[in-house]
């Protein structure tokens, strides 16, 4: 949720406080807890490996990130595409 507060994100799609509240409510009802079982050491930044593990163990359809230096450069993890937020917006037609 923190990423929605970034000025460049707010400017990109004119994100409002109401939109952030709607996203938070949606996430509360449509997400699930993921137990991490994998031990993945692929990111140039070891702190980012937890996101890769979560995507794999949670059987994600995609991993969305703005981390160009580390995560986006991997392009995919175990068949799961690693994509930018702008790419998701285009894919979803938003």
Image (tube, rainbow, N blue to C red):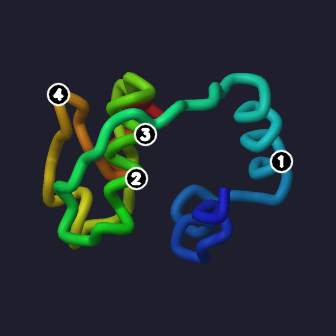
Total numbered badges shown on the rendered structure: 4
> Which disc number belongs to residue 54?
3
Which residue position is annotated with label 1? 21
Is residue 1 depicted above or below 61 in this figure?
below
Element marked by disc 3: helix
Q: Residue at x 19, y 39 (%)?
A: 77
Q: CA distance from mark 1 to mark 4?
A: 32 Å
> Which disc number belongs to residue 90?
none
Is residue 90 depicted above or below 1 in this figure?
above
Callout 4 crowding tier (Cα within 10 Å): few <14, some 14–19, many ≥20: few
Image quadrant containing the N terminus: bottom right
What x and y, as percent, mark residue 73? 15, 60
The mark nearer the N terminus, 3 or 1, is 1
What x and y, as percent, mark residue 17? 82, 59
The mark nearer the N terminus, 4 or 2, is 2
Q: CA distance from mark 4 to mark 2?
A: 17 Å
**Residue 9 in which image quadrant:** bottom right
Front tag of 4 and 2: 2
Q: Residue at x 63, y 26 (%)?
A: 32
**Residue 78 in which image quadrant:** top left
Tell me, yes or no, whether the two marked residues, 3 and 2, touch with CB atoms within 8 Å: yes
Front tag of 1 and 2: 2
Which residue position is annotated with label 2? 50
**Residue 88 in which image quadrant:** top left
Tell me, yes or no, whether the two marked residues, 1 and 2, touch with CB atoms within 8 Å: no
Q: CA distance from mark 3 to mark 2?
A: 6 Å
Tell me, yes or no, whether the two marked residues, 1 and 4, touch with CB atoms within 8 Å: no
The mark nearer the N terminus, 1 or 2, is 1
Element marked by disc 2: helix
> Which disc number belongs to residue 79?
4
């Amino acid at each position: 949720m923190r990423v929605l507060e970034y000025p460049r994100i707010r400017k990109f799609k004119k994100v409002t406080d109401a939109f952030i509240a709607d996203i938070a409510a949606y996430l509360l009802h449509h997400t699930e807890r993921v137990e991490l079982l994998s031990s993945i050491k692929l990111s140039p930044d070891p702190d980012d490996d937890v996101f890769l593990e979560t995507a794999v163990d949670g059987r994600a359809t995609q991993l969305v990130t703005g981390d160009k230096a580390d995560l986006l450069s991997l392009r995919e993890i175990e068949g799961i595409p690693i994509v930018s937020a702008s790419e998701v917006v285009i894919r979803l037609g938003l």
